[in-house]
Image (cartoon, rainbow, N blue to C red):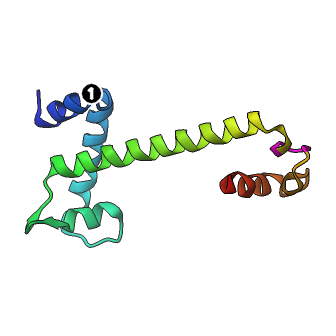
Amino acid sequence: MTELEAVLAAVGGPPKAVVNEIVEYVNNQLAQRRGSAGDQLLDAMTDAEVEGEKLNELELATFFILLMSAGNDSTRATYSATMLELLCNPELQPGGKCPGCRTSRSTASRAARVLRRR
């Protein structure tokens, strides 16, 4: 078991195949970008230092696994909360009685504004 696999197993991380795919992708990107300056997140992470030391490949891959997990989690939570709000409050649905959500060309954006305020 690699160090990354041990860390992920301890915290109940994503399946090994997913981890391996992410690690392979990050390592390929690192190989392509070595020695060239850029303005992408991976470029900034490659240049970053913690206590005077650059992040190693394991730390970079772990960061991206956490970043992808966090993005997935926040998207799922937002979508779920929005759907629950729409189901519990039919007036927010298109054609409902919510003045900010009346059926029109911009129904979706109006409904989104109302849901963000709730």
Report x, y in % for residue 61. 24, 47
| Residue at left offset 21%, top offset 28% | 9
Residue at image position (28%, 29%) is 12
- Above or below, 36 against 23 in this view is below
Please name the amino acid that badge 1 sits on. Lys
As drawn, 44 above or below 10 = below
Residue 27 appears in the picture as rendered: no
Q: Specify the quadrant of the image occupied by residue 100.
A: bottom right
Q: Name the residue under label 1.
A: 16
Magenta stretch: includes residue 58: no
The single residue placed furthest to the left in the displayed view is 52
Q: Residue at x 24, y 70 (%)?
A: 36
**SS category of the residue bearing label 1:** helix
Residue 95 occupies quadrant: top right
Q: Which of 74 and 28 is in front in this view?
A: 74
Residue 96, horizontal then vertical, whole percent = 90, 43
Q: Residue at x 32, y 45 (%)?
A: 66
Tell me where residue 4 appears, x and y as whole percent. Answer: 17, 37
Closer to the camera, 57 or 70? 70
Q: What stretch is highlighted in magenta?
A: 92-96
Judge whether residue 99 can be spotted in this image. Answer: yes
Q: Quadrant of the N terminus?
A: top left
Of 66 and 20, which appears nearest the observer? Answer: 66
